[in-house]
Image (cartoon, rainbow, N blue to C red):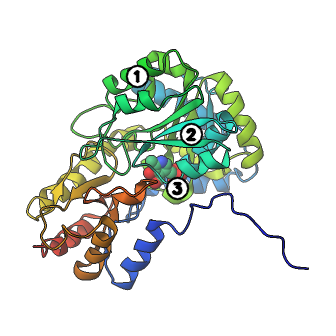
Amino acid sequence: MNAPELETKLPKVGTTIFSLMSALAAKHRAVNLGQGFPDFDCDPKLIDAVSVAMQSGHNQYPLMAGNPRLRERVSAKFESIHGVRYDAVNEITITSGATQAILSAILAVVRAGDEVIVLEPCYDSYMPNIELAGGVAVPVHLKHGTFEPDFDAIAKAITPKTRAIIVNTPHNPSGRTWTRTHWQTLADIIASRDIFVISDEVYEHMVFDGKPHESAVCVPSLRDRTFVISSFGKTFHVTGWKIGTVCAPAPLTAEFRKVHQYTVFTANSAMQEGIASYLADPKPYLELPAFYQAKRDRFVAALASTPLRALACEGSYFVCANYEDVPTLRDLNERECAEWMTREIGVTPIPVSAFYSTPTEQRTIRFCFAKKDATLDEAIKRISSLV
Ligand SMILES: Cc1ncc(COP(=O)(O)O)c(C=O)c1O
C-alpha cells in the first residue's frame, strides 16, 4: 500500500533564509553576521551553577509550571525592574525558550478563524504559529525606512475577528524599541476590544543609551490582557539552552498552562535550577546593556566609514543598514545583496525582506553584532572594501 498523502499544514514554510545564508557563508568562508546568536561563551559561573544542579539531583521532571525557586526569582526581578508584580505560583511559567512560549500563548488564545495582527518585519515563527492555531495572520507593516509602528494602519486592521496582536520590543530585525507612548497608544486603540497582547520581549536587557526597556505592562491597563515573553537564552548568551518565561495574569496563565502541559509539559530541570542560582546576582543582566552597547558602537562607528548607512539601533543585538548609496549594490534586491556580499567581500548579512510575508524591498540588510570584537573587526575590514 502506498503511504497516505500528507497535505502540508504550512504550505508557505520552506528552508529558512538563515539556513540558506549560513550554508553560503560556510561555502565562501564569510564572516557570518546573519544568524542571531553569540559566537562567544557564557559566564563560566552559569555553567558551574547548572553542573551543581545536575550533581545535586535536579535531573527528573520539575513542576509543570517550572522550578518554584526560578519563578520566585523571575517575579522579584520583574518587579524590581518594572515595578509590576507577577505571582510566582499563578502568573509565571517557565518554558522551553521563547519560541515555545509564543506558540503556546497563540494556541491558548487563538481559535479557528480568529485574526491576529502581526507587525512586519517580524520573527519568523509568528505567522506559522498562528496558522497552526487555525487563525489568520493579518500583517501590518512597520513604517518603511524607520520601522516605527503605524498606529493608523493597526487601527484600520482591527475587525470584530481580531483576537490578538503580537508586538516585539526591542525589535528583531530593526533594533527599534517601543516607548511608553507607543504602548499607551496601542492600549487606547484596543481598550474597548477583546484583544490580547503577546509581547515578545526577548531582548529586554539589550536597550541602549541609558534608556529603560519599556515592557508592555508599563501601561497598567495592558497587564490584564498581555503575555510578556522573555528568554534566558538571549540574556545569558545560551541560546541553545532554550529556557524562556511567560508572565501573564492568572486567568491567562491558567489557559496557557493547559497548552504547555500537553505540548512540552515542562522545561529541563538542571538549566532551571542552575539559572535560579545564577539569578541571585543581578549584575550579569544589569551590565548587559553596556556590554552590547559597546559592540553596537564599535560596529556602527566602523560602518560610518563605509558607504553603507546604518539605521537607528536602540536595542537588541541587530543593526540594519541601507545600501541605496552603494553603486555596486543599489540595483540588487536584498537577497541578491546579501548573497553578493557573502560571495564577493566575505561578510554575510540577512535580507530584511526575509522577515515579511509578501515581497517588500527597502534596500536594507540586517547584521548581528552579538559577536567577539575580533569577529566584528574582521567583518568591518572586509566591508570597507565596498565602494
Ligand atoms: C524576536 C524573537 N523572539 C523569540 C526568539 C526565540 O527565543 P528562544 O531562543 O528563547 O526561543 C528570537 C530568537 O531569535 C527572536 O529574535
Regarding residue 120, the answer to whether it shows in the image is: yes
Q: Is residue 215 left or right of residue 179?
A: right
The picture places residue 12, in percent across and down from the top left corner, at: 57, 60
Q: What residue is disc 2 on?
A: 245
Q: Nearer the viewer, mark 1 or mark 3?
A: 1
The picture places residue 5, in percent across and down from the top left corner, at: 79, 70
Judge the density around disc 1: few (<14), some (14-19), many (≥20) Cα neighbours within 10 Å. some
Q: Quadrant of the N terminus?
A: bottom right
Q: What residue is disc 1 on?
A: 218
- Whether 374 is drawn above or below 264: the answer is below
Q: Amino acid at mark 2?
A: Thr
The picture places residue 128, in percent across and down from the top left corner, at: 58, 52
Between disc 1 and disc 3, whose residue precedes? 3
Q: Quadrant of the C terminus?
A: bottom left
The picture places residue 224, in percent across and down from the top left corner, at: 56, 19
Q: Nearer the viewer, mark 2 or mark 1?
A: 1
Judge the density around disc 3: few (<14), some (14-19), many (≥20) Cα neighbours within 10 Å. few
Q: CA distance from mark 2 to mark 1?
A: 18 Å
In this view, which residue lies farthest toward the right? 1
Q: What residue is disc 3 on?
A: 48
The image quadrant that residue 373 belongs to is: bottom left
Marks 2,1: beta carbons within 8 A: no
Local SS, label 3 = helix
Does mark 1 have its CB less than 8 Å from ligand 1? no
Q: Amino acid at mark 1?
A: Cys
Residue at the image position 56 percent from the left and 25 percent from the top: 195
Q: Amino acid at mark 3?
A: Asp
Q: CA distance from mark 3 to mark 2?
A: 22 Å
Q: Nearer the viewer, residue 273 or 63?
A: 63
Q: Nearer the viewer, residue 277 or 205?
A: 205
Q: Count the labels in the image.
A: 3
